[in-house]
Amino acid sequence: MQHDFWHERWQNNQISFHQGEANVWLRQFWPVLGLPPGSRVFVPLCGKSIDMLWLRTQGYKVIGVEISRLAVEAFFVENGLSVSVTNQGAFTVYETEGIRLYCGDYFALAAQHLDRACAVFDRASLIALPPEMRVDYARQMRRLLPPGSQALLVAFDYPQAEMQGPPFSVPEEEVRALYSAYCDIERLHVADILAQEPRFRDKGLSRLHEMVYALTYN
């Protein structure tokens, strides 16, 4: 992954992708997956996302991976969480009740790290990656998850030539090209959000759709 790029973003606090509350689509559509409480949920490229706290309050066990140590440590400090820290191979592992974060490279994960996780919430992971990395990202996710696993995926669709990512545009046809060999794909929602996103309008975007998908792994 582009390690230096993301380390620099966190060091310079250039984290406009971070949301101060649980994602609206997570809260609205997570029940569609029908996961029983106690299920393990994987949050890739998790940063210091509040979504992980929301998932824990719903009774799920959360496993995340994040390359930036600053992000991982900020998650625990800013939320007043006690944490134990251990080393596990290529990862430093931060853990509190119901949440385990691997600090390291997503592509270095193996299935055993996810401890039988059967669901994924991907809000800012796929769209953080340039095109040449997204195929490998999807293949790695398939290697990590057992058949029957489900995912809630949020993606942007905008004219890529109008703005340099990240976040990148990943239109529906690309989502289906990336995942259809591994998953059944259901589009749950499309929202035109340009009017609510002045930072994207200021960059010259003429259109910005946020797409929500449910994936079921075969």
Image (spheres, rainbow, N blue to C red):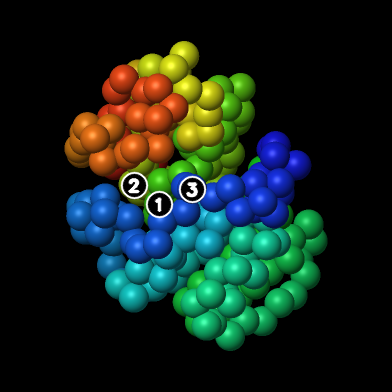
* Up-down relation of residue 129 to residue 96 (above or below): above
Q: Position of residue 34 (x, y in %)?
A: 23, 58
User: Mark 2, residues whose alpha carbon is within 10 Å: few (<14), some, or many (≥20)?
Assistant: many
Sequence order check, earlier mark of 1 and 2: 1
Residue 139 seen in the figure: no
Sequence order check, earlier mark of 3 and 1: 3
Tell me whether circle 3 and circle 1 mark residues in contact (CB < 8 Å).
no
Sequence order check, earlier mark of 2 and 3: 3
Left of 162 or right of it: where is 144? right
Which residue: 47% across, 60% down? Answer: 49
* Residue occupied by mark 1: 121
CA separation in Å, label 3 and label 1: 19 Å
User: Mark 1, residues whose alpha carbon is within 10 Å: few (<14), some, or many (≥20)?
Assistant: many
* Up-down relation of residue 17 to residue 166 (above or below): below
Determine which quarter of the picture holds residue 64.
bottom right
**Of the pair 157 and 187, the residue shown nearer to us:** 157
Q: The residue under label 1 is which amino acid type?
A: Phe
Q: The residue under label 2 is which amino acid type?
A: Leu
Marks 2, 3: nearer the viewer: 3
* Up-down relation of residue 77 to residue 143 (above or below): below
* Residue occupied by mark 2: 152
Q: Position of residue 100 (x, y in %)?
A: 57, 70
* Residue occupied by mark 3: 16
Tell me whether circle 1 and circle 2 mark residues in contact (CB < 8 Å).
yes
Which residue: 58% across, 77% down? Answer: 77
